[in-house]
Image: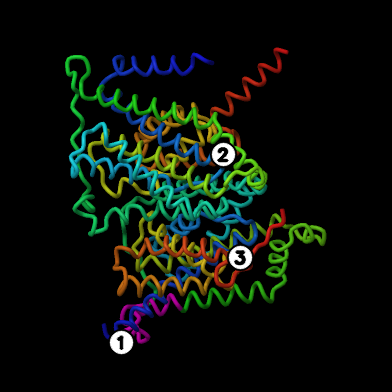
Amino acid sequence: MTMQTLLHQLLSGFAMGAIYASVALALVMIFKATHQVNFAQGELAVCSTYVAASLITAGVPYWIAFALTVVISFVAGVVIERAVMRQFRHASVLTQVIVFVGFLILFNSLTGWVFGTMTRPFPSPFADNAWYGSRYLSPHEIGLIGVTLVVLAIVFVFFRYTRLGLTMRAAAENPASSRLVGIRVGWMLALGWGLASTLGAVAGVMAAPRLFLEPNMMSGVLLYGFAAALLGGIDNPWGAPIGGFIVGVLENVAGAYLVGSQLKLPLALFVIILVLVLRPSGLFGRTVVVRV
Amino acid sequence: MKLAAPAAIVIAVILPFVVSGYHTFQLAQVLAYAIAILGLNLLTGFSGQISLGNGAFYALGAYSAVIAINNLHLPYGVAPVVAAAVCFVLGYLFGKPAARLEGLYLALATFALAVVTPQLLKLDRLEPWTGGRGGVQIDKPVSPFPSVLDDDRWLYMYCLIVAIVMFALAWNVIRGRTGRALIALRDHPIGAGAMGIDIAEYKAVTFGISAMYTGVAGALGALIAGFISPDSFSILVSIQLLVGGVVGGIASIFGTLFGAVFIEFVPNLANQLSDNAPGVVFGVLLILCMRVMPGGLAGLVASARARRAHRGT
């Protein structure tokens, strides 16, 4: 075990962590607004990735296909919230979970039906021999870290400095008062769904060159995303990406040195249970006290 | 209504002599599913804990049974008992910390368990017992009375006896002290705690019982299929059980039978359209059911009966 391989594992984990960070942030975004966990987040992302793949195969240049995918995913997220999830806004937790699981299996099967279940490669916009590649990180890994950081920065600026972003936060934080000051809370939730779906799409498109595209591509990623969101504190949007990077590095380093590659995925389960049992609020979350 | 259970048993005994061998095989699988769905209903319907991970215990039961028969050379009759014991203990141990989790987080943890299951079954270290990625075969039980029952019917009867025992047990648990404690726990956990019900312990035990039911079902499922492999125990098994529970009625004992018939036969029909059609049907149904009939078929029947009674008076 040399220093170089360790560094390589660390950085490579950081790259995967960028993907988990996006997924975790998407999960947190929906959780924060609705107290729901989107079990279908991964399948939605796969759907988006297939849309991107189809556009690219049809000859659309990569970045235009990327932009179109982002827009389509956003609209799809808004539509799902408006058309279906809205009806379950005040349903029991069990009902909501069942609906999400319904979406999971529905999208998984639809994707397989429409696009086929064959595993296929997915292009990366970052050429294999680009100057920014190194022995530690491939150009695609550098690129995906870059894209993720840009996306995270945009999300940060949006929620911190724009009127719409602040309105959305208000609607999530205190729906009753927001409604009183004239915010259309329902639509803000729908926008949140759209953004979450967009983040998932970016994660899917960035993960696909590495994981190869097939309908179950994101099931493992979603699990790491859950672990990341819980680790960062599921109600903390800043904790989620940090959790994502931690989980990515942990997964890679532990997989290489501690538990072996076969136990990488079970490690996510372990992190989830450990956080839930020992520190349910995560590293940066708020401890919720319920008065009975 | 008092005659419903005996009538159901009589019909269940006659059925395999009326239908073809292949249908007998399918009906045996229905019985296995019914037991598994019953396990889910005990947990989710009666004690209010959400599990998306019962497929993991279905797998555990299947593997325990196969290992008991293939490696330990135990008789077929003992295999479900082994599966029950293993699953109860591991279910209880998983339920112990999980019992502290509220609905949504429990759903998350169990979901993770279900996703991870095939990966755990593939572990190289377990390969001598589990057969690794390739899976293991198991010889189907041979009928001791070949002149009366062929092997398919014998296996069906075997499943039927196990199912009757499991249903009778569940019936007694639900209507007794434990059942009332569970329902109290579901409807008002704080009140239940104030009444002296040890919430954490009851929840963990229920998790164990649910795992035990699912494990017995998995054991039967393995005998019926004659072959098990890690990839047949993906998250889909858990989702399938959830569909069965929801369609039949998640807090109903007899709804489980309908749910089991549904998840055995509907995918077979939908498969003719596309390999992916069953999933689409399941997904749409889960969402629709929650909107239109959250009580499942049992709920519909109950409300229809209530309406009729209301009109009668």
Q: Are marks 1 and 3 in contact (CB under 8 Å)?
A: no
Residue type beneath disc 2? Leu
Residue A134 magenta-drawn? yes
Q: What's the mark number on residue A235?
A: 3
Q: Position of residue A132 (x, y in %)?
A: 37, 86
State the separation of the CA atoms marked 1 and 2: 55 Å
Is residue B40 placed above or below A292 in the rendered structure? above
What is the crowding at mark 1: few (fewer than 14 residues within 10 Å), some, or many (at least 20)? Answer: few
Rendered residue at 41%/54% (across/down) = B113
Residue type beneath disc 1? Met
Foreground: B290 or B83? B83
Is residue B73 placed above or below A27 in the rendered structure? above
Q: Residue farthest to the front?
A: B196
The chain identifier of the residue carrying mark 2 reads B
Residue B12 magenta-drawn? no
Q: Nearer the viewer, mark 3 or mark 2?
A: 2
In the image, the segment drawn in magenta is A127-145
Q: What's the mark number on residue B182?
A: 2
Q: Quadrant of the N terminus of chain A?
A: bottom left
Q: Position of residue A209 (x, y in %)?
A: 36, 68
Question: What is the image's colouring?
Answer: rainbow
Counting residues from the start of the chain, the first of labels 1 and 3 encountered is 1
Foreground: B178 or B63? B178
What is the crowding at mark 2: few (fewer than 14 residues within 10 Å), some, or many (at least 20)? Answer: many
Local SS, label 3 = loop
Query: On the image, which quarter does residue B191 sit in?
Result: top right
Pointer 1: what residue?
A: A3
Query: On the image, which quarter does residue B138 sit in?
Result: top left
Local SS, label 2 = helix
Q: Position of residue A238 (x, y in %)?
A: 58, 73
The chain identifier of the residue carrying mark 1 reads A
